[in-house]
Amino acid sequence: MKKVLSTYLKPYYGRMLVGFVIKFTGTVMDLCLPWILAYMIDTVIPQVGQGTGRNDIFIWGFVMLVCSVLALTFNVIANRMASKVARDTTEAIRHDLFERIMWLSNAKTDAFTKPSLISRLTTDTYNVHQMLGRVQRLGVRAPILVIGGVLVTLTLDPVLTLVLVSVMPVTAFVTYYFSRKSIPMYNALQRAVDQFVRLLREDIAGIRVIKALSKMGYEEEKYDALNKKVVTLERKADATMAIVNPATNLFLNLGLVFVVIAGAYRVNQGNSEVGKILAFLTYFTIILNAMINFSKMFVIISKAVASANRIMEVIDVPDEMLPLVCERLAENEDYIRFEHVTFSYQLTKTEPNLTDISFSLQKGETLGIIGATGSGKSTLAALLMRLYDVDQGNIYIEGEDIRTIPTGRLREKFGVVFQNDTIFEDTIAGNVRMGRTLSDEDVKKAVAYAKAKEFVEEAGRGYDNHINIRGANLSGGQKQRILIARALAAHPDILILDDSSSALDYKTDAALRHELAAHFADTTKFIIAQRVSSILHADHIMVLEDGKMIGYGTHEELLSCCEVYREIRDSQL
């Protein structure tokens, strides 16, 4: 929360100061009205009864009108300025949070979880926005009304002011105590909201599977259970903060009763006047409303503190992918080299997902990777792109340890199709281009290389044809070909195809391999596949089992020396 105030609000300190002065002036105008009214009742009107001071009524009435107009105008201006500061500050926070999320390592993304990151970008930033706006409006006005009201009432009747002030410490303590107690509750609530977002995300993404298996009732039960958990936590937090308003009202209304009783006695004894008592009651009402606004503001602050801490937890994550200083390979013969690479997704690092992987490739060579599900094929590609850092060993590209290469420059070398990759809601050309400075000709060539030209040009609007979210209006094979075109469009130095031809028929798969050989001879290729036919002609083939390399060589070499590879070939061919 401190960083929000010290960093993100700092550019707006000047504007906030101007807004404070304007708000202060408008609030003072509000405080002047009851005092003027008391003066007119106790001083001006009695003079009228004596035949003098008639003009003073019009003069003071005009002053009240001017004060009312100034109070309205200044408060509206100050509120608009506060809203602009809150909007611009939240925009900056949201921008930095999104940018940080984009550059998080995969390990940190996994640790935070995607639903939690979505919740921080939406719900948490909204809570901070609400707090910034309310604090500037109520946080300035309410203290001025309370302090100013007390000071003015001292000039009217010090005895009654003491009665009023006596109840204020109790209300302040109640507000502070319950606000502090509610912050951990709102933290727990936001964590439950993260789980809620995750469930919604999964259910909406998998709606077709749920319907196909007729598991709507099952998902509804999960939804209801999590929904009840969120409601319970929200009820508990809100119930805690709900004590503040009634308690504040109770103590202040008791004070009001004491003020009325004491005021009646003082008027009866001639120690006070009716106008002063009327003004005093008006000020008391103003102070009462200000204290109630205080309590409401603390509810918002409690939520915002919890949300701001969650936001800054992401923004302040140290960058794990900064370039390191490592020695360059003395011999720079190999284009890509893995040296004794070991890696585990677990924080404890007790069960490696890859163990002691070593191999090398020359530029333009193709490596086929095959193995059972969970054997570590995709992990190998993720480590090469430095989506994760290795636990042991080194990975080199052109003799440079990939940890010494700036992340942006490293990943510019790659064209990649991940397993279960994402099609965005955009045109076909937009999905292939992905914001890169590629010409229309580059896009068309990539689509042709990916063997997608026929169905793309036959579509209603060709390359401008709209694709629904996650490619819902495309078949599996069409989606894969669009994804392959995206990977090929920038003519990458290294191409990674992770099970990207599983939905293609054998003829299209063979035609794609022919295009890669003809037009991407200088591109080093990693082809991760389940089908032997997809990697049959690769320069090297790696066989993985339980994260270990149990075979490496050409197709013919593996048939003679690797039983697992032979079994895979026999089962498929």
Image (cartoon, rainbow, N blue to C red):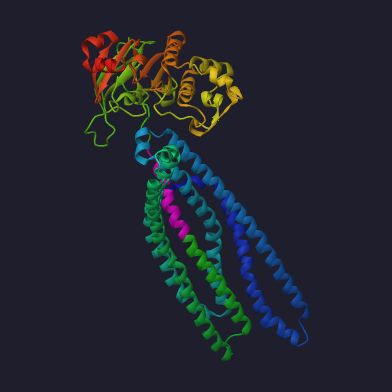
Residue 250, above or below 270: above
Residue 55 located left or right of residue 358? right
Q: Position of residue 372 (x, y in %)?
A: 28, 24
Q: Position of residue 305 (x, y in %)?
A: 43, 53
Q: Which span is picked out in magenta?
A: 299-317
Tag count: 0
The reply to whether residue 180 is in sight is: no
Closer-to-camera residue (451/16):
451
Q: Position of residue 42 (x, y in %)?
A: 66, 83
Is 259 colored magenta in this rendering? no
Is 300 colored magenta in this rendering? yes
Q: Quadrant of residue 559?
A: top left
Q: Quadrant of residue 11?
A: top right
Residue 411 located left or right of residue 144? left
- Image quadrant holding the C terminus, namely top left
Please name the predominant secondary structure of the magenta segment in the image. helix
Closer-to-camera residue (124/95):
124
The reply to whether residue 382 is in sight is: yes
Residue 547, above or below 120: above
Q: Position of residue 405 (x, y in %)?
A: 38, 22
Closer-to-camera residue (311/347):
347
